[in-house]
Amino acid sequence: MAVVDIHSHFFPQAWPDLAKRFGTPDWPWIRHLGDGKAMIMVGEREFRPIYAACWDADTRLAEMDRDGVEVQILCATPVLVHPWDMLGGARTARHMMGWTVAMLAETQLSIVSMILGGAFDRLPRSLKICFAHGGGSFAFLLGRLENAWHNRDVARGVSQLPPSHYLDRFSVDSAVFDERALRLLVDVMGRERVMLGSDYPFPLGELRVGRLVRESRSLSDAERSAILGDNATGFFGLP
């Protein structure tokens, strides 16, 4: 079984001066600090610390070997395409609550919007969709969503069926960082719709990729195998 991390990020080591090219401020750029460390800047503001694994293949491959990861799926990185114009505004500006609260809420909002907006009623089943961050708090709040759908017409949107009917239309990653949350996620979504995702190599990602899944005492061997690689192999059509 190949271990596949479907949620990893990269940055190039450098890119053109986009602010100069387009004549507008607040474009991202990298300020290198030496010793393999750097800071992502947005205009003149510090955005996120990163290190050489974001751009250096040798560093990345060494850490993949360390964690027993054979394949990574590379995702677009904030601030190019990602949950970013987040809920809460000033109320989540402190203590990194944009990352710990608002970003997850945006992911859940995307799922609920697709369900209640009727997207899954119109989109073909052949379209494969996976939400990062464990789907936000969707699994935990599905019961509340389901109850509202059955008891208030206004809460149904234009969806033809209750929210729980659409669970087989999308997958989520395993980036929930808690064994109890992972167990709930698998119970709600089904083992075939959860795939290993780490948010590597960012500071708030899983520091040892796959450790939560490998060490979870509540997962069966079949569930562990499915999450670590089998599901992703089928989802992405990997050999």
Image: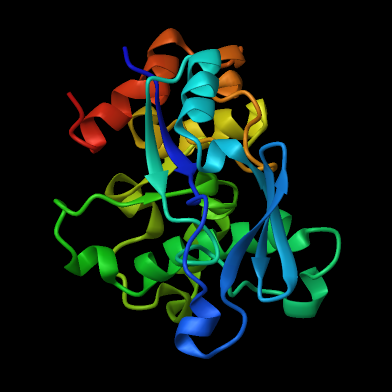
Query: Where does the image place residue 3, in percent across and percent down from the top left?
Result: 39, 20
Residue 130 shows in the view? yes
Q: Nearer the viewer, residue 163 or 122?
A: 122
In the image, residue 187 above or below residue 41: above
Query: Where does the image place residue 25, in percent across and percent down from the top left?
Result: 60, 85
- What residue is at 20 percent from the left and 29 percent from the top? 238
Quadrant (top left/top right/bottom left/bottom right) for the C terminus: top left
Q: Nearer the viewer, residue 178 or 21?
A: 21
Q: Is residue 63 left or right of residue 114?
A: right
Quadrant (top left/top right/bottom left/bottom right) for the N terminus: top left
Q: Residue furthest top?
A: 221
- What residue is at 60 percent from the left and 16 percent from the top? 216
Q: Residue furthest right?
A: 95
In the image, residue 62 above or below residue 57: above
Q: Is residue 123 left or right of residue 200?
A: left
Residue 175 shows in the view? no
Q: Is residue 194 left or right of residue 52?
A: left
Q: Is residue 15 left or right of residue 42?
A: left
Query: Where does the image place residue 66, in percent across and percent down from the top left?
Result: 55, 14
- What residue is at 43 percent from the left and 9 percent from the top? 221
In the image, residue 133 above or below residue 230: below
Q: Nearer the viewer, residue 161 or 176?
A: 176
In which quarter of the view is residue 72 placed?
A: top left
Query: Where does the image place residue 225, in percent across and percent down from the top left?
Result: 38, 15
In which quarter of the view is residue 176 placed?
A: top right
